[in-house]
Each structure stands twice: as structure tokens, then as C-alpha cells.
Amino acid sequence: MQCIHVSVPVLFVTEYRTEPTEQWSMSAPDPLYELVEALRRALASMPGSTAPASSSASAVASPLPPVIASPVAAPALYSGKAEDCNGFLLQCSLALEMQPHSYPDDRAKVAFIVSHLGGKALRWAEPLWTQNNPIMSLLPRFTEHFKEVFGQPERDSSSGERLCRLKQGSMSVSEYALQFRTPAAASGWNEQALITTYRQGLDSRV
């Protein structure tokens, strides 16, 4: 009787055991991680929520800063004196220029000027305003007419006389020049005549 020998391979299985903490971390995900992921999925599924709320809030235009008018003193009440006419209109022009939002059109600007009139100047403006004269809605025409009524004439003979009488005397040169400038502007004289008269009024020691 013949015997047959069969070789059977033997497998050796090595069993590896993990520590309890490692086995828990591999089999059970972190609950905090799952919560974060759930929140992300919920946000992504909401309609129109492609960006966080903070980004949509930043897209809203910020309000414009408030307009603050520059501090300019109001002109003094004008009663109609010719020598004060140009100075009064200059002060009004400065106040209007520094507060453009308060006086947006010509009629508002004219109203501002009229509100600073008194005496015969106010009596002149009253019928023009109450009768709604077109000139009261056109600032350039109003100021031009205002100068015609209350301003000094282009050639003022009294100003020329003042220039001829004006002498430096005990005044400093700067004080004399300041006193000379006002009647010179109203005289209508040419530059050469003004220079000659100015030099004649200077002290001989200058």
C-alpha cells in the first residue's frame, strides 16, 4: 500500500490589539466635528446664502457724513449807506459761499440778503419781494441793481477831494496807505493820478 504525503501550509495569524482610546477614536468620530459639519451643510442648503451675513451687510453703502457748514459770521444789518454797500455784498457772498446747502438757488440767496436789510434799504426791497419781481429770483441782476441804487457812483468827486486833502502827518506809512485806499477805489482815477496824489501826501522825510 502506497502512502501519499500532502503538505498543508500553516498560516500564523498575529492578532494586534489596540488600546481602548485608539479604538474609540477610529470607530466613533468627534461629536464636535460632526456638529460643525452639520451646521455647514445646513447653511449651504439655505437659499440665497452663498456668503456669510457679514459680507452682505458690508455690501450696504455706508451713509454719507453730515454736511457741516463752515462758521462764517453773518453780515451786519445794512441800512443803505453808500460807503458800506460793497462791503455788505462781500460779506453776504462769503456767507452764501460757505453754506451752499442752506441756500441752493438764487431766490434763497436773495432772500438771505434781504433778511439783512434795514432802514431805507429794506423799504426799497419790500415792494420788490411782495410783488414777486423777477429780479428777486436772479442773484446777478439783483446785486447789480442793488449797487446802482445804494453803491457809490463810479466817479465820486468827493472821494477825489478827500484824496487831495489826505496827508500822512503822524500816521505810519501803512496807516496812511490804508486811509488812502478807500477813497482811491471810489474815485475812478487812473493809476498814474493815484500814484502822484499818494506821493504828494507822504511825509517829506519818507
Image (spheres, rainbow, N blue to C red):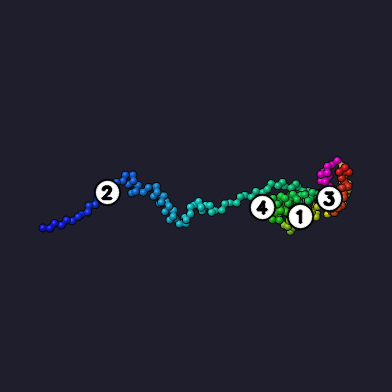
Label 2's element? Answer: loop
Is residue 148 or residue 16 the one in the foreground?
A: 16
Q: Residue at x 88, y 42 (%)?
A: 205
Q: Is residue 171 left or right of residue 110?
A: right
Label 1's element? Answer: helix
Q: Quadrant of residue 174?
A: top right
Mark seen at residue 14: 2
Residue type at tag 2: Thr
Q: Circle 1 sits on which residue?
A: 143
Mark pair 1, 4: CA separation: 21 Å
Q: Main secondary structure of the magenta part?
A: helix
Residue type at tag 1: Thr
User: From this viewpoint, is residue 158 visible?
Assistant: no
- Quarter of the picture containing the N terminus is bottom left
Q: Circle 3 sits on which residue?
A: 184
Specify whether residue 94 is painted magenta: no
| Of the image marks 1 and 4, the number of the one nearer the N terminus | 4
User: Which mark is nearer the camera, 3 or 2?
Assistant: 2
Q: Residue at x 35, y 47 (%)?
A: 25
Mark seen at residue 101: 4
Position in image of residue 58 (x %, y %)? 53, 52
Position in image of residue 184 (x %, y %)? 84, 50
| Of the image marks 3 and 2, the number of the one nearer the N terminus | 2
| C-beta proximity under 8 Å, tags 1 and 4 | no
- Quarter of the picture containing the C terminus is top right
Q: Residue furthest top?
A: 170
Mark pair 2, 1: CA separation: 110 Å
Mark pair 3, 1: CA separation: 22 Å
| Of the image marks 3 and 4, the number of the one nearer the N terminus | 4
Count residues near mark 3 (Cα–Cα under 10 Å), then give few for <14, some for 14-19, many for 20+: many
Boundaries of the magenta span:
170-184
Position in image of residue 169 (x %, y %)? 87, 42
